[in-house]
Image (tube, grey):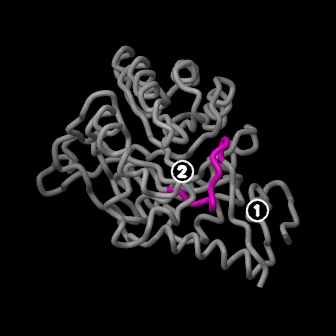
Amino acid sequence: MKTIDLSVNIAGIEMRNPVMTASGTFGFGEIYEDFFSPAELGALVVKGVTLEPRAGNPPVRLVETPAGLLNSIGLENPGVDEVCKEYLPRISKYDVPLIVNISGSTVEDYCRVAEKLSLYPIVKGLEINISCPNVKAGGIAFGSTPEMASLVVKSVRKNSSLPLIVKLSPNVTDIAEMACAVETAGADAISMINTLLGMKIDIQNRKPVLANITGGLSGPAVRPVAVRMVWQAAQKVKIPIVGMGGIITAEDALEFILAGASAVAVGTGQFVDPSCCPKVIAGLRAYCQENNIQDIRSLIGAAWKGKNSDG
């Protein structure tokens, strides 16, 4: 049996395989220990961290939809100081690269969170969530225009030397333009896609189900959109892409890789099956074995590069 190389490098972060967790779905790692060791992952991406503690939105915050999930959690987290003091030391027991997702209401918030986290060697990279509303611009999301997205990336870059992975919102007119903008601004990689904006209405009570009215749609329902966006962005940028959106199986992950993603992140799938990540990893290895692929990197973008990926 041939040795299969599943390792990938994302912006200088060496990963034993291309499977990561999607921010907001894995907590800080400990809640999944009964199902598998986080050390099996390529990288551990923890829930979004903000400058100050956030209680999140009032309930109802989650609602199931056909082939998906609407969430409006509201970035509930203990704040960066508590994360650094209490959570980072506990996460250090895992032999896995740690990437911290960061959010903010102002550019200054992003910078201060990045600066604090950069003091801890355990943190190998920052994932910048630019889907947050900019309170200084009337609540318009940072990721809604190339100019605002670029401003956040350039500002964070001045406050951290860590690899910066910018998480793109799909709620834009041209995803490739956004990808190019953050690459030019200094992003080392991009992750895509964040959730699609959606809502659900209770027809009996005749009002929205979510207390926040709208929420982010994730799960298999968004996968075709996510694969299409990865395909478009991959042909425009040179930096690595982490693909996500409805990945449940290795076959789902392979769609993203063939579209141009160097790695993938599993999110909602973990709620369906807490052992989803190790199953995806095993499935990728089996696919490579069955198809005589010695190095999974040979599959990246093969659907449009015209590669003969025969290992």
Looking at the picture, how far across and down is residue 258, in whole percent?
72, 60
Q: Is residue 212 left or right of residue 295?
A: left
- The magenta region covers 10-20
For residue 34, which quarter of the picture? bottom left
User: Which numbered disc covers residue 169?
Assistant: none
Q: Amino acid at mark 2?
A: Pro
Closer to the camera, 155 or 214? Answer: 155
Q: Earlier in the sequence, mark 2 or mark 1?
A: 2
Q: Secondary structure at mark 2?
A: loop
The residue under the point 24% across, 41% down is 213
The residue under the point 36% across, 65% down is 32
Q: Is residue 56 left or right of residue 152?
A: left
Q: Is residue 48 shown above or below 303?
A: above
Residue occupying the far bottom of the picture: 1
For residue 139, which quarter of the picture? top left
Q: Secondary structure at mark 1?
A: helix
Name the residue carrying label 1.
299
Q: Is residue 97 shown above or below 16?
A: above
Name the residue carrying label 2.
97
For residue 182, which quarter of the picture? top right
The residue under the point 34% across, 53% down is 27
Q: Quadrant of the N terminus?
A: bottom right
Looking at the picture, how far across and down is residue 106, in whole percent?
38, 19
Q: Quadrant of the C terminus?
A: bottom right
